[in-house]
Amino acid sequence: MDNQKFGEFILSLRKEKSWTQLELAEKLNVTDKAVSKWERGVGFPDIKMIEPLAEVFDVSILEIMRSEKMSEQPIPVENATEAITNVMDVVNFQRKIERRNILITITAFATIVMLLFLIDTMQWEGLVMICDGVKFFL
């Protein structure tokens, strides 16, 4: 999905309703900063937000995923396939971010445990050496 196109679509839908970013954010239980990021094409809402967005704006999920309004005609198979592909792309992107965040958390926790073990093993002298080493890098 194209974040820029999606952002412009959300912006136009919001303006049609004459809502502020804060009003839209309150309807979706998100922050106005999140709405701002979506509209600027900097971020994309969580996949769980697609259905509430469609409901709030009274458009179909397919229209949200394609970032364009569609006529009331039956949905061609190509459009449905494209929408499903877009959803899968978003899900994969969000999983990648979740994996990165988990890796960062595990690394930080392991570092803290190793530092505590080092300090406990070396007693106060070890703590002084670590502090001196930190001063050297600063």
Image (cartoon, rainbow, N blue to C red):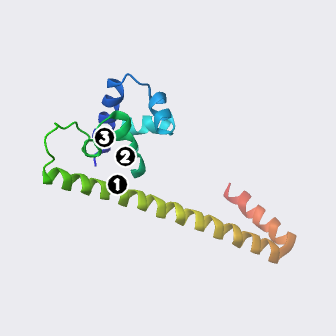
Q: CA distance from mark 2 to mark 1?
A: 11 Å
Q: Quadrant of residue 40?
A: top left
Residue 16 in the image: x percent, y percent? Answer: 32, 24
Question: Residue 90: which numbered mark, if any?
Answer: 1
Res. 97 in view: yes
Which of the image's four quarters has the C terminus? bottom right
Q: At x 33% / y 37%, what residue is drawn?
A: 7
Q: Quadrant of residue 18?
A: top left
Between residue 101 and residue 117, name the one nearer to us. Answer: 101
Q: Secondary structure at mark 1?
A: helix
Q: CA distance from mark 3 to mark 2?
A: 11 Å
Q: At x 32% / y 30%, what residue is drawn?
A: 13
Disc 1 marks a residue whose amino acid type is Val
Q: Earlier in the sequence, mark 3 or mark 2?
A: 3
- The answer to whether 21 is drawn above or below residue 132 in the figure is above
Between residue 54 and residue 83, name the one nearer to us. Answer: 54
Q: Disc 2 marks which residue?
A: 50
The number of numbered discs placed on residues in the rendered structure image is 3
Q: Earlier in the sequence, mark 1 or mark 3?
A: 3
Q: At x 36% / y 61%, what residue is drawn?
A: 92
Q: Is residue 97 left or right of residue 80?
A: right
Q: Earlier in the sequence, mark 2 or mark 1?
A: 2
- The answer to whether 40 is drawn above or below residue 121 in the figure is above
Question: Residue 6: which numbered mark, if any?
Answer: 3
- The answer to whether 59 is drawn above or below residue 77 in the figure is above
